[in-house]
Amino acid sequence: MEVTAPMTINALNGSSVRLACTFNSCYQVVEKQFALNWTYQECWNCSEMMLLQFKSKIIPVEQTRFGNRVKFTGNVAKYDVSFTLHNVQLDDEGFYNCFVLNPPDRNRGHAKINLRVITEEPPERDSTVAVVVGASVGGFLAVVILALVVVKCVRRRKQQKLNTDDQKTEEEGKTDGEGNPEEGPK
């Protein structure tokens, strides 16, 4: 079994965020056998706190920390076990673990999401300048490469012409090595 979730999710303080978790299994989900646990850890090595369980149905585990802000928004039959955390708070930052078991799969799958809570949206990036610079540099490089190919072809033609001229000269004035013309067979 393979469980997939993003490694890191950024959420704006006060917003709602969906913590996506999906799984692949060779077997269809039989709700009476299927098991799901979502846990929360404040830090990597901290103890885990249960958020949600699935045993024949979703059971929200009462936690004073999250209250009723946790809502299951997945669809187990479609291999989606995601949940949404509403009204995200700064102290919701931490690690969220998704554990899935779908018998007859023998292994329990696991994914971990690092939730980071931010206090303001990062500015949108304007990629117009990057596109213009990239196109300019790409165009310049294409012209340089084309010029190098033309120069190489011109040099090769000159070299071939010189080789052809040398060959004609040799054939016209063959000598015996001492400057005397060779005599053909007698």
Image: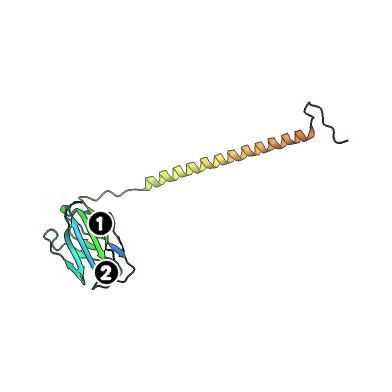
Residue at point 41%, 43% (across, down): 133
**Image quadrant assignment for residue 186:** top right
**Image quadrant assignment for residue 101:** bottom left
Q: Residue 59 location in percent, x, y?
A: 17, 68
Earlier residue among tags 2 and 1: 2
Give the residue at mark 1: 112
Q: Are marks 2 and 1 in contact (CB under 8 Å)?
A: no
Residue 145 in view (yes/no): yes
Q: Which amino acid does label 1 sit on?
A: Lys
Residue at point 67%, 38% (across, down): 160
Q: Is mark 1 on a helix, strand or loop?
A: strand
Q: Distance between the residues labelled 2 and 1?
A: 18 Å
Q: Is mark 2 on a helix, strand or loop?
A: helix
Front residue of this view, candidates 127 and 54: 54
Q: Residue 167 location in percent, x, y?
A: 73, 36
The correct choice, above or below, for 88 with respect to 177 in the image is below
Give the residue at mark 2: 76
Compared across the picture, whether 58 is left or right of 125 comes to left
Compared across the picture, whether 180 is left or right of 42 comes to right
Q: Residue 76 location in percent, x, y?
A: 26, 69
Which numbered circle lies on residue 175? none
Front residue of this view, candidates 153 and 124: 153
**Image quadrant assignment for residue 3:** bottom left
Residue at point 75%, 36% (across, down): 168
Residue at point 14%, 60% (across, down): 66
Q: Which amino acid does label 2 sit on?
A: Val
**Few, some or many C-alpha atoms within 10 Å of disc 1 (few <14, some 14-19, many ≥20)?**
many
How many numbered discs, if any? 2
**Few, some or many C-alpha atoms within 10 Å of disc 2 (few <14, some 14-19, many ≥20)?**
many
Residue 81 in view (yes/no): no
The correct choice, above or below, for 55 with respect to 118 in the image is below
| Farthest top residue in view | 178
